Image (spheres, grey):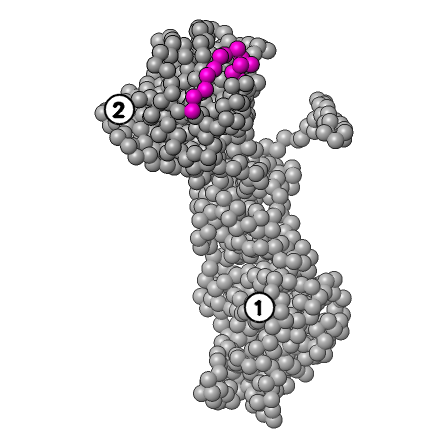
């Protein structure tokens, strides 16, 4: 196997060595695939999740893909962060992309679920099997046709249903109407155990179970107390007994705590508090007349009262006549087993009771109150925070939320599996995805051996700068924004005969306006694309007569000025930390210039200007395919060790004096906001179009530069060689429509110095000393004014230099015949005002 060694020598003396070895050859994955349920995404914030979804959607729109492969990649080859989203998928690629776009836009979409990981969710969800009321005509019909696990479970209980109730569960679920209460009760059980089978097949396992009324039967099956036949028998025995009481009872939900409701109904047997639904809600049960009375009276008091869709008074004295037969039938079944997972009871006063689920238990389940609030409270006290309502429609989810909030449990998740009249298969997938979003474990069929996609965007990093921002130079209000890829800093408008606008900033390595490095022959310089983008942004239109005279090296801090005056643009800089040579100190150096274009400079649309778009004839003229790294490797060979921007060549073709390059300007899937990246790719590609050995060439002059609209994420570069070292470059979108052009871009060749003095790359405009011819010195000096002390001091200095001098107190004393070479030096007194000194000077001149 291939091996590589990495040696690291730390600044403080730390030494580390790593040996890397090629991974074992993986088996072919062509035949290994896993059906997708959802595409999972995650991030550390909602904003970054949206960016991630957007990048993935854009990537998928550009390439053909398998939904299963994308889902496998996101599941096994991405970290799973606390803020999550999922797109429920099927075989439709377009639906997956639309779901990702909805997630990116943070808009509502039935295919999209989001959530945040809940503390403790890694232990799994509590499966809650609700009671009567979740049924609807058509429930289970889609699952019977599309989910083999569901259909197999229903078919298995069908034999019991036929023997005990006289009807087929499969036929009843596919019928137009479900029928009477006894049928609904039994079908509720069938739906719940069928959904449990589907959930297990999707990789979801319960951490614990809670059953509500008839839901306790399914809870016992899932918890391992009953097998499916035993559970179906208990469900049928309960349901068959209701036939004698159907049509005589009623139930209603009231917004009152259970204890308060029981107090109000104390002493009555025709209506009782039957179900502790939540900390704030109770279900009452009794005869139809008694419940009607309660509904009318309590509604008149202003309480919220809602009828339950049933004609049987469950969990009330009306059930007394049914309990002996139920006990006898259940007693004939095999002994129940022990629960394999926590099983919270709603029939016992102690929710954690592990009493046998025999005849006595099911009598209590039918006749006594349902202690649902207590069961949810016990689960919460045991650390459970994620609850999954396994039913055809959520009827207790709201009650679970109310109970958790009353307990002060803020971080929680309550997830329903199905909803009335909604596509069932998608609803199951969405429920599993929502469990994932809240952190519950999901054991998918995807493994590291599953086929996956290799070219999806990676983590969408949220880049933040932590380097100290250099202090702005005096007179400016702001530095340039490095992410703008320009050198435009604070703006000053200068009035005058020819008004000007000046952008001023300070440039250093830690705020260079390009994301990478751009060393040319070991000297870091600002890419020409940044200078062009600066001019284009300042001009607000195209450019003509662009001159790129001198590179801008950011290695030493310098002040930068961009000046726009009467359509003329220029970029100049000045070192701020001293100069290499004394004669450069404080001087401004002009690096580049351009002229703002007028409409007539282009005279038409870009496509017309460039002779039409990139069409089939263009491709036909470029038959030779080149490696994707051709440009980068060629430039590296002549001294350009790295590109300043992260553009990537997808494919490259060459013809006679022509190049066609398909380039992605996106870095890590992030959209490109400026033209700088594509301009950098264009200038780099154009420098390699020439025949002969590779040479280091840099753009020196461009006749015209034009861009139209925002830059495309993927562009086609068409480079054509002209006379000498001149080139034309057009930048088109993926349809071939030209979006930008660089016309008559002329390159200048630089030496390939291989160790020569890099200062030869830099052209300097500087003052040089000019020798001044020696002249005869002064013949004598006349000192006028000042005090005796000042005159004496000056006289001594002049005498020491060999210059004779004479002193006069007033200009009137100066002789008329001062000779050639005589110097008159006025020396005002230290106590004299400026006006007195000026008067002395004027008097002397006269």
Name the residue located 60 percent from the left edge and 62 percent from the top edge.
412
Residue 365 part of the magenta segment: no
> How many numbered tags mark residues here?
2
Q: Is residue 357 above or below residue 112?
A: below
Q: Which residues are magenta?
A: 797-809
66 over 361 or under it: above or below: above
Which residue is located at x 53 percent, y 23 percent? 793
- Classify mark 1: helix, strand or loop: helix
The tag earlier along the polypeptide, 2 or 1, is: 1
Q: Nearer the viewer, residue 83 or 229?
A: 83
Closer-to-camera residue (776/644): 776
Q: Does residue 487 lie above or below 35 as drawn? A: above
Q: Residue at x 53, y 46 (%)?
A: 48
Residue at mark 1 = 401
Quadrant in the picture for the N terminus = top right
User: What residue is shown with label 2?
Assistant: 602
């Amino acid at each position: 196997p291939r091996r590589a060694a990495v040696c690291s020598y730390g600044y403080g003396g730390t030494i580390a060595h790593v040996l890397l070895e090629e991974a074992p050859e993986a088996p072919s994955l062509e035949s290994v695939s896993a059906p997708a349920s959802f595409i999972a995404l995650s991030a550390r914030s909602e904003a970054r999740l949206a960016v991630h979804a957007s990048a993935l959607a854009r990537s998928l729109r550009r390439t053909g893909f398998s939904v299963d492969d994308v889902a496998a990649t996101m599941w096994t080859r991405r970290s799973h962060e606390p803020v999550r989203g999922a797109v429920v998928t099927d075989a439709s690629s377009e639906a997956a992309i639309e779901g990702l776009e909805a997630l990116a836009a943070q808009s509502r979409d039935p295919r999209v679920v989001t959530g945040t990981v809940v503390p403790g969710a890694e232990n799994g969800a509590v499966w809650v099997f609700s009671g009567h009321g979740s049924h609807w005509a058509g429930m289970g019909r889609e699952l019977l046709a599309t989910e083999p696990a569901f259909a197999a479970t229903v078919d298995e209980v069908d034999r019991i249903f036929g023997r005990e109730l006289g009807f087929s569960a499969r036929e009843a679920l596919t019928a137009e109407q479900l029928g009477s209460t006894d049928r609904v009760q039994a079908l509720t059980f069938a739906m719940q155990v069928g959904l449990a089978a589907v959930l297990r097949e999707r990789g979801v396992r319960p951490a614990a179970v809670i059953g509500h009324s008839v839901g306790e039967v399914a809870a016992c099956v899932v918890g391992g107390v009953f097998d499916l036949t035993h559970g179906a028998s208990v469900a049928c025995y309960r349901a068959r007994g209701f036939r004698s009481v159907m049509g005589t009872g009623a139930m209603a939900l009231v917004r009152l705590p259970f204890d308060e409701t029981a107090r109000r109904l104390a002493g009555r047997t025709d209506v009782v508090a039957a179900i502790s639904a939540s900390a704030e809600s109770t279900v009452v049960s009794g005869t139809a007349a008694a419940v009607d009375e309660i509904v009318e009276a309590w509604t008149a008091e202003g309480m919220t009262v809602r009828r339950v869709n049933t004609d049987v008074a469950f969990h009330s004295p009306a059930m007394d006549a049914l309990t002996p037969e139920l006990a006898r039938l259940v007693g004939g079944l095999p002994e129940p087993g022990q629960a394999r997972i926590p099983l919270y009871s709603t029939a016992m006063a102690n929710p954690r009771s592990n009493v046998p689920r025999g005849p006595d238990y099911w009598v209590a389940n039918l006749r006594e109150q349902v202690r649902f609030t207590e069961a949810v409270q016990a689960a919460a006290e045991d650390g459970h925070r994620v609850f999954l309502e396994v039913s055809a429609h959520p009827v207790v989810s709201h009650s679970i939320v109310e109970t958790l909030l009353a307990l002060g449990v803020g971080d929680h998740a309550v997830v329903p599996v199905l909803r009335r009249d909604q596509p069932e298969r998608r609803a199951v997938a969405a429920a599993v995805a929502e469990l994932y979003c809240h952190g519950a474990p999901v054991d998918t069929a995807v493994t590291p051996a599953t086929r996956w996609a290799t070219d999806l965007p990676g983590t969408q990093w949220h880049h933040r700068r932590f380097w100290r921002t250099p202090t702005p130079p005096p007179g400016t209000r702001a530095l340039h924004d490095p992410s703008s890829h320009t050198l435009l800093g604070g703006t000053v408008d200068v009035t005058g005969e020819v008004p000007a606008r000046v952008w001023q900033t300070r440039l250093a390595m830690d705020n260079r306006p390009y994301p990478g490095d751009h060393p040319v022959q070991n000297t870091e310089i600002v890419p020409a694309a940044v200078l062009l983008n600066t001019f284009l942004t300042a001009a607000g239109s195209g450019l003509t007569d662009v001159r790129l005279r001198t590179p801008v090296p950011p290695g030493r801090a310098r002040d930068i000025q961009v000046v726009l005056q009467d359509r003329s643009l220029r970029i100049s800089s000045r070192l701020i930390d001293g100069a290499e040579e004394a004669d450069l100190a404080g001087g401004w150096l002009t690096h580049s210039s351009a002229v703002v274009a007028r409409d007539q400079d282009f005279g038409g649309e870009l496509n017309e200007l460039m002779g039409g778009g990139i069409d089939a004839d263009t491709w036909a003229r470029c038959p030779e395919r080149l490696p994707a790294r051709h440009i980068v490797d060629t430039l590296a060979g002549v001294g350009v060790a790295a590109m300043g921007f992260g553009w990537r060549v997808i494919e490259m073709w060459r013809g006679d004096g022509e190049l066609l390059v398909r380039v992605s300007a996106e870095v890590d899937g992030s959209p490109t906001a400026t033209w700088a990246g594509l301009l950098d790719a264009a200038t780099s590609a154009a420098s390699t179009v020439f025949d002969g050995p590779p040479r280091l060439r840099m753009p020196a002059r461009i006749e015209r530069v034009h861009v139209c609209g925002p830059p495309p994420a993927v562009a086609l570069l068409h480079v054509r060689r002209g006379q000498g070292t001149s080139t034309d470059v057009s930048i088109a979108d993926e349809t071939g429509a030209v979006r930008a052009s660089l016309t008559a871009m002329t390159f200048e060749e630089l030496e390939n110095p291989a160790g020569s003095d890099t200062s030869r790359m830099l052209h300097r405009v500087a003052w040089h000393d000019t020798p001044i011819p020696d002249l005869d010195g002064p013949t004598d000096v006349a000192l006028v004014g000042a005090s005796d002390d000042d005159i004496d001091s000056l006289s001594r200095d002049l005498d020491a230099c060999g210059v004779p001098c004479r002193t006069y107190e007033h200009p009137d004393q100066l002789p008329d015949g001062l000779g050639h070479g005589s110097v008159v030096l006025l020396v005002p007194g230290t106590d004299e005002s400026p006006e007195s000194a000026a008067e002395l000077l004027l008097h002397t001149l006269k």
